[in-house]
Amino acid sequence: MKKHAERIIYGILVGLFLISCQESKRDSAEKIVNDWIGKEILLPADVDCWYMGQDTVCPPRENKPYKMLVYTDSVGCTSCKLNLMLWKHYIHEMDSIAPGEVDFAFYFQPKNRKELAHLLRRDRLEQIVFLDNTGTLKKQNRLAEEMEYQCFLLDKRNKVIAIGNPTLNPRLWDMYKTTIITNK
């Protein structure tokens, strides 16, 4: 009987610990989001541009009402982090529901340029991407280390409207779409 009571108490304590950890993580995420909303993101001018893994001339910056800024560094599994096929789907979807409203800006800090070029060609991302070889974007804006906080929805003045990587959390993509469609 005593062991049974100890197990129940142990189970309750573990449950309380797990709940407090989840609340702590949620509180931390809310703080990060609140700290970023309204901040201006500075985009580096000294970057190389690629189109499907080949050097190209950097286009003039478009002044569309919205910009989806995606930053990816070279830490870890590059192909896992990029999820280019899902981004292609998101770009196509956005072009159909809000044509000409959203510019997608992919900034990569590649450790292995050949691997990145291969991934861009393999997944046929027909989009100009920016190579930030020195990590200027991350440094000057003090981006978080966690990749879930390295993706931003910006307004036309590059001020943060929302933060979060929709390839990691599809509910964020729904939120981004709703924000753009309701503010057209």
Image (tube, rainbow, N blue to C red):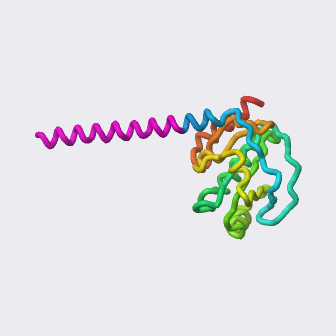
60 inside magenta stretch: no
Residue 110: x percent and y percent?
Answer: 69, 62
When the figure is inspected, residue 118 is found, relative to residue 88, above or below; the finding is: below
Q: Nearer the viewer, residue 128 or 38?
A: 38
Residue 36: x percent and y percent?
Answer: 65, 37
When the figure is inspected, residue 57 is found, relative to residue 43, above or below; the finding is: below
Residue 14 found in image quarter: top left
At x 72%, y 50%, the residue is 137
* Image quarter (top left, top right, bottom left or bottom right) of the C terminus: top right
Residue 40: x percent and y percent?
Answer: 74, 38
At x 78%, y 47%, the residue is 43
Residue 82: x percent and y percent?
Answer: 64, 56
Q: Which residues are magenta?
A: 1-28
* Image quarter (top left, top right, bottom left or bottom right) of the N terminus: top left
Q: Is residue 154 visible?
A: yes
At x 70%, y 58%, the residue is 109
